[in-house]
Image (spheres, coloured by chain):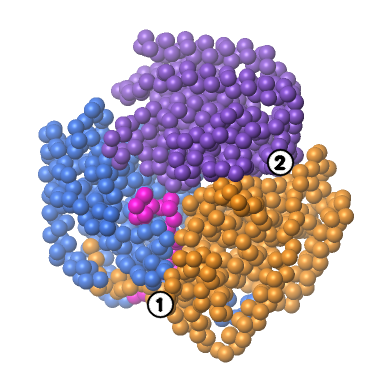
Chain colours: A purple, B blue, C orange
Amino acid sequence: MREPDSAWSRNRLGSCKGAEVTASAGMACELIRFMSPDDANIAGNVHGGTILKMIEEAGAIISTRHCNSQPGEPCVAALARVERTDFLSPMCIGEVATVSAEITYTSRRSVEVQVNVLSENILTGAKKVTNRATLWYVPLSLKNVDKVLEVPPVQYMRKEQEEEGKKRYEQQKLERLETKQRNGDMIFPVINPDPYTVGYSQSSLIHLVGPSDCTLLGFVHGGVTMKLMDEVAGIVAARHCKTNIVTASVDAINFHEKIKKGCVITISGRMTFTSNKSMEIEVFVDADPFVDEPQERYRAVSAFFTYVSLSKEGKPLPVPQLVTETEDEKKRFEEGKGRYLQTKAKRQVHLQPLAQQ
Amino acid sequence: MREPDSAWSRNRLGSCKGAEVTASAGMACELIRFMSPDDANIAGNVHGGTILKMIEEAGAIISTRHCNSQPGEPCVAALARVERTDFLSPMCIGEVATVSAEITYTSRRSVEVQVNVLSENILTGAKKVTNRATLWYVPLSLKNVDKVLEVPPVQYMRKEQEEEGKKRYEQQKLERLETKQRNGDMIFPVINPDPYTVGYSQSSLIHLVGPSDCTLLGFVHGGVTMKLMDEVAGIVAARHCKTNIVTASVDAINFHEKIKKGCVITISGRMTFTSNKSMEIEVFVDADPFVDEPQERYRAVSAFFTYVSLSKEGKPLPVPQLVTETEDEKKRFEEGKGRYLQTKAKRQVHLQPLAQQ
Amino acid sequence: MREPDSAWSRNRLGSCKGAEVTASAGMACELIRFMSPDDANIAGNVHGGTILKMIEEAGAIISTRHCNSQPGEPCVAALARVERTDFLSPMCIGEVATVSAEITYTSRRSVEVQVNVLSENILTGAKKVTNRATLWYVPLSLKNVDKVLEVPPVQYMRKEQEEEGKKRYEQQKLERLETKQRNGDMIFPVINPDPYTVGYSQSSLIHLVGPSDCTLLGFVHGGVTMKLMDEVAGIVAARHCKTNIVTASVDAINFHEKIKKGCVITISGRMTFTSNKSMEIEVFVDADPFVDEPQERYRAVSAFFTYVSLSKEGKPLPVPQLVTETEDEKKRFEEGKGRYLQTKAKRQVHLQPLAQQ
């Protein structure tokens, strides 16, 4: 969680600045796009997944550019991790999204990118911060996709920036290791589930990976995966509460396994926890490289999405409580509650200034 | 700066050819498009589904145009049925597809459209007929989607054209009724299936219907549905034989139920029959209008796709025989064999001249 | 099943009309497409960029076809220049666009294509000319992209057609040379700009070039570039006047430098001039081949777009005057005024008949 008063989080509308962390040319990068009906749900709210996809595209461009900024083997930066991301205010059809990315730290083999998303109501000129995200990329050789190359170092204006970056780097490294353990779970169909049970709302999407989903290396863009994950989480949430639902936040996502062009991917979601006004949905992505004989289906990513339900006026609505039936479901509900309370506590400490925006 | 009175700038609408079946303006319509990597599989062969989607777009334009050609209630032509379609030769990335549609018959409440698809290697100038399709559309009122309007009659050059059209109309009406009966079947997951069994290759895709999938009436374009159906059939075929596979033909498809924007659709496929060099795959489309409370999931469409397996040189390869296990699978295999033999017999009678092209 | 010898199934390639300029088969080519929500802004007006992209696709097909119509080295026609293009009337979602292209002149190494765009309200049958464009293509060898091949000559019905074409050819050649000089300009971010200044509305857009953006030669389609240019110009215009804005015209665009697959392209726009009811926006495209080590970022294209602001009823609205601050901005404003007055004068001379359509 970043402090909103840092150099980075100042209003970045001013476009591509070197800011305080500087050195290589093209340190910041901006991506602007009109939001169209295809980006949004029926109520006109842009899908969280569309925003995550834009965030990742900006991150991939800036980090690939940075990693190729010194002579050496050409490479493509691949997404390794996205830190927990909050959706601070909704974005609507017809608004302009401005996504600014900046490199804020480099370790020997990874790049930290911070991304800011603004929505701009082009008719009134009103601008709002809708997201702040932190992503980690690693440079993979264009000739040998299994080889991670070295990252040219960035220069910092203040010594503390490097130290803070290093702390964030160590922290995420630990968390990445932890999540490598879990991930074994599966979702099975339930016949005639009762309303508000886990089986009632659980959902899947299945997608064949095409050329436009992939990077130059022939692997799925992290942003494409996150968009599908958000889509399935949205279906689970809508099935549960039958109202207009929007993404409130996404927990940290680790990309341990790449997904290759031509795979079939199954994205499954199930509700794990409900508070009075929010739902937590666990999402799994499984890749099946069905033509490559020896390779088995594998778990590529998993994450927790939090959704809220909105009235027609855009006010949060109460959410029907999740009915847990099995021991596993009860356990997951308790774990979800733990995450919910922890986040709530953190938010009270760190994010207070945001409320004033 | 051109003068608007030059030969070039004359109104070019005259390009809609009346051909032999004529009367209302704009009887024929043509659609031309470059084939891009997004349209094709890894071997560079354009998906049958991409072609079906273009065929349906041309058919929808010409029949909507015709049905609105006389004063009265505005309407949108909706796809009711596609007759059996053969893929006569492959289309590749970089080639130009030319899709020509023509109205060949009208009943009181339906329109028959015949569509021709040509592939053109733009470098050598070589052109090949890749498809011929016949589609049936019905005009639905723009104000009341459940109301089928009357179709303005076409005029025929020769009396026999009308009579032949009427025969085709009666024939398809009968067949439509028949298929309304079956459709109850479901596909269930199989744990650890053996190679070459039905469970080994069965597959699904799940898709959330977005605005760009839909017509002005807010229902999914028939062509969008067919593209997804072909995609799942292709996955089943590739899982079975692990080679480059292409669509050889599609049996008649009847669209009994519309699918609305916002539905989740599940497209499932299972292999039903293999001959020496072909595979038959049955595909189901189920729509789940999950937010509209009272409505249940329903079967919207089903169809049989035939695939062949190709070597790197584009020659047909032998196909591993399907291993049937249950009584139902054995029954479906025999039914598929029946369809296979019937088509083979028909082809020898009717399509001989095609072989000479 | 139809008999292949029926009237309908005769080879329909004959639909490529020879018109008056004739000789090689397939001189004209037509492209028809439904306009979907993805093609339009929130008010339902199809983006000028979508239309430019279709125009270029039709031009690329017909000129590539022509350049390969005689035995010799295979080639791909690459867009070299688009003449000034006016948007004569708006196109809307649900309408059908018909794009007809015809070759009107050939020099030794270039092809002139004229393209006509019609919008068709398929419910009422109403048709309108929305655009007329002239494009110049050059044939590049498929084996050596830096080699320009010779163009087979077209035959003309009337001697004057050839002479008029030659004049247009000489004229555009001169203009191409001129624009090769400028192009050095850059757009810098402005902190806290005042409303209606240049810095207030300037915008950029970053895009990673993917496989489906490219021709067989692996270079970006001119139409893809123009679509992105129009998108950024639209954002600039909307930021300036906060209303529904539409493309009114595009000045001649010269494509001096190709853009390769895998590049990152930055498309930047800034307002240069406002009249009472129109805005002129200058757009730059810079390509960054960041993976190819030695190559520097370069200016690939630049152009001027003119936009108008529309009321809800589709009537032109007054535009807030652009506030120029620096000497450069004032100079550009005067230059823009010059272009505006020149176009206005030309239109009064040449385009009078159009007003009667």
Type of residue at label 1? Answer: Pro
Image: magenta residue range: B19-46
Q: Main secondary structure of the magenta part?
A: loop
Decide: few, some or many residues near mark 2? Use Cα within 10 Å; few <14, some 14-19, many ≥20: some
Q: From this viewpoint, is residue C280 visible?
A: yes
- Residue depicted at x 23% and y 68%: B354
Of all residues, the one furthest to the front in this rendering is A72
Secondary structure state at the residue bearing disc 2: loop
Q: Is residue C69 left or right of residue C161?
A: left
Position of the C terminus of chain A, as image quadrant, is top right
Quick check: is B21 in the magenta stretch?
Answer: yes
Cα gap from disc 2 to disc 1, whole angstroms: 51 Å
- Residue depicted at x 62% and y 35%: A152
Pointer 1 residue: C71
Q: Chain of mark 2?
A: A
Nearest the viewer among C163 and C99 is: C163
Q: Quadrant of residue C336?
A: bottom right
Q: Chain of mark 1?
A: C
Q: From this viewpoint, is residue B172 visible?
A: no
- Residue depicted at x 16% and y 56%: B343
In the rendering, which numbered label is found on residue A16?
2
Location of residue B171 with respect to A37 vertically, above or below: below
Nearest the viewer among B181 and A209 is: A209
Disc 2, disc 1: CB below 8 Å?
no
Secondary structure state at the residue bearing disc 1: loop
Location of residue A125 with respect to B191 vertically, above or below: below
- Residue depicted at x 53% and y 71%: C148
Q: Residue C246: x and y, percent? A: 67, 55
Q: Is residue C53 left or right of residue B356?
A: right
Q: How many marks?
A: 2
Q: Quadrant of residue A63?
A: top right
Of all residues, the one furthest to the bottom in this rendering is C159
